[in-house]
Image: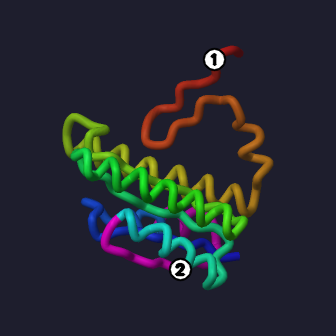
Amino acid sequence: MKVGIADTTFSRIDMGKIAIDELRKISSLKYERYTVPGIKDLPIAAKKLLENGCDIVITLGWVGKTQKDLVSYLAMSVGLITVQILTGKHVIDVTVHEDEAENERDLLAIAENRVREHVRNAVDLLMNPKRLQKLAGTGQRQGYPDVGPILR
């Protein structure tokens, strides 16, 4: 099995490097990395990775603070959903928005945590889907502390 990792040069940290580091820590799965300029390029990157034999793709996007950036994110999201429908394979969207944190240190922590947790999710989707079933309804968050279920 092979994991596709698509990242961008627009990101303010090397999200692809973090994803590869986490993937190597938790599995022996092969991977292929594809780097593109920005988030609107991620849908075609995901499609190409799937066509190259990847069983799942993790897209790593970074969204700026402007309204234009949010519109680009929406376009990218629709594109990734389309790729999933057309290929019948998962594309895990890992996106960090610059307005998620008050300072760069917190933004870095959110980004790194989100990437690492979604790599684990992707590996579980491929290798251990029962683990995700056990976590259903538990308020898991990527990038932030888990919130837990509403009712216990």
Q: Closer to the camera, 21 or 45?
A: 45
The residues colored magenta run: 21-38
Q: Position of residue 42 (x, y in %)?
A: 44, 68
Q: Is residue 88 left or right of residue 139?
A: right
Residue at point 49%, 68% (across, down):
43
Please state, as top left, top right, bottom left or bottom right, where the C terminus lies in the image.
top right
Q: Is residue 58 above or below residue 143?
A: below
Q: How many marks?
A: 2
Residue at point 72%, 65% (across, down):
88
Residue at point 42%, 51% (across, down):
74
Q: Secondary structure at mark 2?
A: strand
Q: Closer to the camera, 42 or 128?
A: 42
Does the magenta-highlighted stretch encompass residue 120?
no
> Extreme right residue here?
130
Q: Earlier in the sequence, mark 2 or mark 1?
A: 2
The residue singled out by tag 1 in the image is: 150
Colour convention of the picture: rainbow
Does the magenta-highlighted stretch encompass residue 23?
yes
Q: Position of residue 129 (x, y in %)?
A: 76, 52
What's under tag 1, amino acid-wise? Ile
Residue 32 is labelled as 2
Q: Is residue 61 above or below residue 54?
A: above
Q: Closer to the camera, 6 or 88?
A: 88
Task: Say if residue 17 shows up in the picture.
Answer: no
Quarter of the rendering containing residue 134? top right
Q: Is the residue marked by circle 1 packed among few (<14), some (14-19), or many (20+) residues within 10 Å?
A: few
Residue at point 43%, 61% (across, down):
60
